[in-house]
Image (spheres, rainbow, N blue to C red):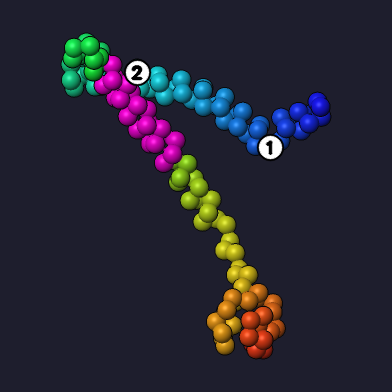
Amino acid sequence: MFKGFRDFVLRGNVLDLAIGVIIGIAFGAIINSLSADVLMPVVGLIFGQPDFSAIVLGPLKIGNLLNAMLSFLMTAFALYFFVVAPMNMINERQKSKQPPVPPATRTCPECLSEVPIGARRCAFCTSELPKS
C-alpha cells in the first residue's frame, strides 16, 4: 500500500505540480506587492484615491468589485510583461539554437502518398521509389 503511494508521490508530474504550486504562492506574494505597493499608488496619483470601496449603489458594493477588477488587471498585466513575455523570448531563442529535424517521410511520385524515407517501394501503389 505504501509502495503505491510512494510511487504516486515520486512520479515526475506530481513533484512538478507541487513545486509549481509552491513557487506560484511565493510569486503571488510578489505580484500582490507589486500591484498594491507600486501600481495602486500610480492609480492614486492619476485618479486621486486608489481605494474605490466607498462607492456603494444601494445594497450593491460596486467599489469592492472595481477594486477586485483593477487588482486582477494589474496582476495580469504584471504577470504577462514580467513572466510570460520574457519566457516566450527565452523559448524562441532555445528553438532557434536547435538544429532542424530531417523529415521522416517523403511523397511517392506516382500516387502522392506519404511513405517512410527509407522505403524502396510505395506501400499504397507498390511502385518503385527513387533513391533518396
Secondary-structure class at tag 1: helix
According to the image, label 1 marks what residue? Answer: 12
Mark 2 Cα shell of 10 Å, populated few (<14), some (14-19), many (≥20)? some
Can residue 1 be seen by looking at this rendering?
yes
Specify start and end residues of the magenta stretch as a single range.
64-85
- Disc sitting over residue 37 in the figure: none
| Gap in angstroms between the C-alphas marked 2 and 1 | 36 Å
Secondary-structure class at tag 2: helix
Question: Looking at the picture, does residue 51 appear above or below residue 6?
Answer: above
Question: Looking at the picture, does residue 109 appear above or below residue 30?
Answer: below
Q: Residue 50 appears in which quarter of the rendering?
A: top left
**Residue in the picture at 61% in, 73% down:** 105
**Residue in the picture at 57% in, 88% down:** 110
Disc 2 residue type?
Ala
Mark 1 Cα shell of 10 Å, populated few (<14), some (14-19), many (≥20)? few
Q: Residue 59 appears in which quarter of the rendering?
A: top left
Question: Looking at the picture, does residue 60 appear above or below residue 112?
Answer: above
| Front residue of 61 and 105 | 61
According to the image, label 2 marks what residue? Answer: 36
Q: Earlier in the sequence, mark 2 or mark 1?
A: 1
| Front label number (2 vs 1) | 1
Is residue 73 in the magenta section? yes
Q: Where does the image place residue 60, in percent across and percent down from the top left?
A: 23, 15
**Residue in the picture at 28% in, 16% down:** 64
What is the number of callouts on the image?
2
Can residue 132 be seen by looking at this rendering?
no
Is residue 96 in the magenta section? no
Q: Where does the image place residue 124, in percent across and percent down from the top left?
A: 63, 81
**Residue in the picture at 51% in, 27% down:** 24
